[in-house]
Image: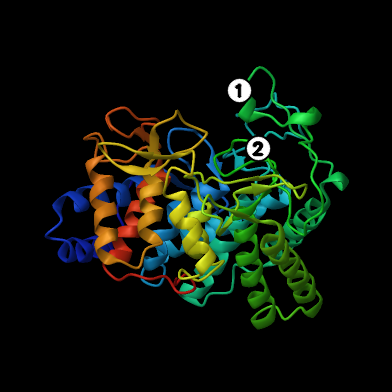
């Protein structure tokens, strides 16, 4: 996408620039991010599928690439080029899922790049095989949101249906992880990058939820029922139920999807709730079904703060609001308050490092327009003068940051800014 900027993209950007004339700093970051992702991360391949670099790592994450193109959905009805890019990415995702639904990141070709020495079932096209529920959920989300925005059902082809079967197979198997063949070990590395118990992970009991080896940060789970990722699974299973009711009309598939969705949701509501210091009910981040639960949140999405953004619950849900209040306080060990900002970090980065995407998600899950503005201002103010966002930045010294080029937070800024000016995707309303 380096050759030229589509006319539709130019017109859309002109529209936003007129709307935001009083916010020149926002516009600088918006214009840079919107074009950088399009021109420098997206590659249309010879088979017309789309490969999307995460940024400074030469691989495509199913999760990141969905978030990276999501704001372009607003152009899908105006630009055949953008429409083809998104359709090509959906097709690519489900091709990769059909190769291995346990993998989270892929190479552009069978080039043996990435973590080929990991002790798991690697293939040359796989960059990394850390199993994360959300990787699969994001692919379904992209296909659904594209359909809702455009009415185009052509992505629901044989590749999609086979991929959905693979997703359902994995999520059902991982409701009883003892029946799984998945293991993952990485030698000579930090402990967050490898699973315990000879790569199988620690013991869990049946809850109805589905097991995850790793968090969306790519760090291992401590307790392997990752509640926000199970919330995301519930939401996208609802999308699949709609697809198979309205379009594919497959009653057996509908029953299977509905059963799994109900089991996971019951599991969340029965086992995925704990208490904060005040004794009020809040969602746990992770549980194991054996009585252990973690009260925390991580900046990477899905997280608990993103639950209504993911489509799991209403933004005014009482348990969600209590959870949100708790996690945006010192009860969350990854919540940091400093001179530059206050927000959530991650086990993936040093202590006292706030993630830009946590500021975006705070804004995207607020109904207060002034608060959204505050988050947009804070993101711009903490870009270290680079006119691009990073992974984590120090709460007092934003010039100290991790990752020079990380497209996901850039596009979350774009999404929050577009929402501030009234842009809403069909099927993604809070």
Per the model, the C-alpha gap separating discs 1 and 2 is 21 Å
Percent from the top left, x then y, of residue 272? Answer: 66, 56
The picture quadrant where one finds residue 167 is bottom right
Percent from the top left, x then y, of residue 234? Answer: 65, 65
Write down the residue under mark 2: 126
Q: Nearer the viewer, mark 1 or mark 2?
A: 1
Percent from the top left, x then y, of residue 385? Answer: 21, 35
Nearest the viewer among 153 and 384 is: 384
Percent from the top left, x then y, of residue 250? Answer: 76, 78
Tell me the quarter of the image containing the C terminus: bottom left
- Above or below, 266 against 292 in this view is below
The numbered mark, 1 or 2, whose residue comes first in the sequence reads 2
Q: Residues within 10 Å of mark 2 (few under 14, many from 20)?
A: many
Q: Horizontal placement of 394 versus 122: left or right?
A: left
- Above or below, 241 against 11 in this view is below
Per the image, label 2 sits on a secondary structure element best described as: strand
Q: Horizontal placement of 177 versus 61: left or right?
A: right
Q: Residue furthest left?
A: 22
Q: Residue at x 24, y 58 (%)?
A: 373
Write down the residue under mark 1: 190
């Amino acid at each position: 996408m380096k050759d030229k900027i589509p006319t539709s993209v130019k017109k859309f950007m002109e529209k936003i620039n007129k709307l935001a004339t009083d916010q020149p700093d926002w516009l600088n970051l918006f214009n840079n991010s919107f074009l950088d992702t399009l021109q420098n991360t997206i590659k249309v391949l010879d088979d017309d599928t789309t490969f999307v670099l995460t940024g400074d790592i030469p691989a495509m994450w199913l999760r990141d690439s969905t978030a990276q193109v999501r704001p372009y959905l607003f152009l899908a009805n105006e630009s055949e080029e953008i429409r083809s890019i998104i359709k090509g990415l959906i097709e690519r995702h489900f091709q990769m899922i059909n190769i291995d639904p346990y993998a989270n990141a892929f190479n552009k070709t069978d080039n043996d790049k990435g973590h080929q020495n990991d002790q798991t079932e690697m293939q040359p096209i796989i960059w990394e095989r850390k199993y994360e529920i959300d990787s699969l959920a994001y692919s379904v989300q992209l296909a659904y949101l594209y359909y809702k925005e455009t009415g185009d059902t052509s992505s629901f082809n044989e590749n999609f249906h086979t991929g959905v079967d693979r997703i359902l197979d994995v999520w059902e198997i991982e409701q009883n992880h003892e029946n799984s063949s998945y293991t993952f070990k990485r030698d000579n590395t930090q402990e967050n990058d490898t699973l315990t118990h000879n790569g199988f992970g620690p013991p869990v009991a049946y809850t109805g939820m589905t097991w995850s080896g790793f968090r969306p940060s790519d760090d291992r789970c401590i307790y392997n029922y990752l509640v926000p990722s199970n919330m995301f699974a519930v939401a996208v299973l609802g999308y699949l139920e709609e697809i198979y009711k309205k379009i594919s009309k497959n009653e057996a598939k509908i029953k299977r999807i509905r059963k799994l969705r109900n089991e996971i949701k019951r599991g969340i509501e029965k086992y995925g709730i704990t208490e904060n210091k005040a004794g009020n009910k809040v969602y746990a981040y992770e549980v194991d079904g054996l009585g252990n639960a973690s009260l925390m949140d991580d900046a990477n999405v899905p997280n608990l703060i993103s639950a209504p953004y993911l489509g799991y619950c209403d933004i005014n849900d009482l348990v969600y609001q209590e959870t949100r209040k708790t996690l945006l306080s010192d009860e969350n060990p990854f919540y940091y308050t400093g001179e530059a900002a206050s927000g959530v970090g991650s086990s993936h980065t040093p202590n006292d490092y706030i993630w830009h995407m946590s500021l975006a998600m705070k804004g995207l899950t607020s109904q207060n327009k002034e608060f959204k503005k505050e988050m947009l201002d804070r993101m711009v103010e903490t870009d270290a003068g680079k006119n691009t966002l990073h992974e984590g930045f120090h709460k007092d010294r934003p010039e100290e940051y991790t990752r020079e080029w990380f497209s996901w937070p850039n596009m979350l800024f774009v999404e929050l800014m577009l929402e501030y000016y009234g842009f809403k995707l069909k099927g993604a309303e809070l």
